[in-house]
Image (cartoon, rainbow, N blue to C red):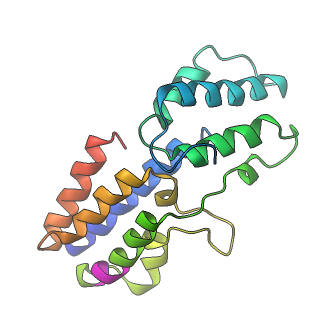
Amino acid sequence: MTKHGLWLTILSVMTAAAALAACGGGGGAGPVDEATAEEGCQQICDHDVACGDPEDPTCVDECVDDVVGTIREDVFVDAADCYASLDCAADEDSCLVCTPTAAHEEYEARCREELPACGVPADQLDDICEVSTSAEGEINPYCLLATSIVSQFTACFDEPDCDAMAACFEQVQEQVNL
């Protein structure tokens, strides 16, 4: 694997996390459980129908599958509640708000420390390592992940070299179905 292989692995994790979050504080920064996901996803799907989308019998199940065990419960609950009360013409992205936890900040610090040695260009570290909202209002997908998952990714930086880090990232990604 090239030094850029780790960078590409991390970007694929971020892309998967962003796709999961597209379905949508309440609870903590742990992963969304099934019951919470069903309630929030039902709110989201009901809102879509109320705003003129055709009823989709798979909407709730697909949403639940996307968020359970992966997305932070606090972020999901807040986003679902916001979305359910949102005017149909409003920007749904305004409901996705994420404040990094200490685990997320640790990920960012380790990422910025370790990735330059793996050939990640300095001008791309923000895209890969940043866990807070950008100046443009974009949320880094790592902020959306449950703290337990972020901690697993952070532990990958303890691997002895870039190839081992990339393999660790891929293993975590497979374990959590990203």
Query: From this viewpoint, is residue 10 visible?
Result: yes
| Range covered by the magenta-colored residues | 112-116
Residue 136 point in image, percent of width and height? 69, 71
The quadrant in which the N terminus is found is bottom left
Residue depicted at 19% across the width and 70% down the height: 158
Pick the residue in front: 136 or 96: 96
In the image, residue 100 above or below residue 21: below
Q: Is residue 47 left or right of residue 161?
A: right
The prevailing secondary structure element of the residues shown in magenta is: helix
Q: Quadrant of residue 161?
A: bottom left
The residue sitting at the left extreme is 160
Q: Can residue 1 be seen by looking at this rendering?
A: no
Identified at 20% across, 58% down, the residue is: 168
Q: Is residue 62 magenta?
A: no
Q: Is residue 74 above or below residue 68?
A: below
Q: Is residue 132 left or right of residue 1?
A: right
Rendered image quadrant of residue 39: top right
Q: Is residue 114 magenta?
A: yes
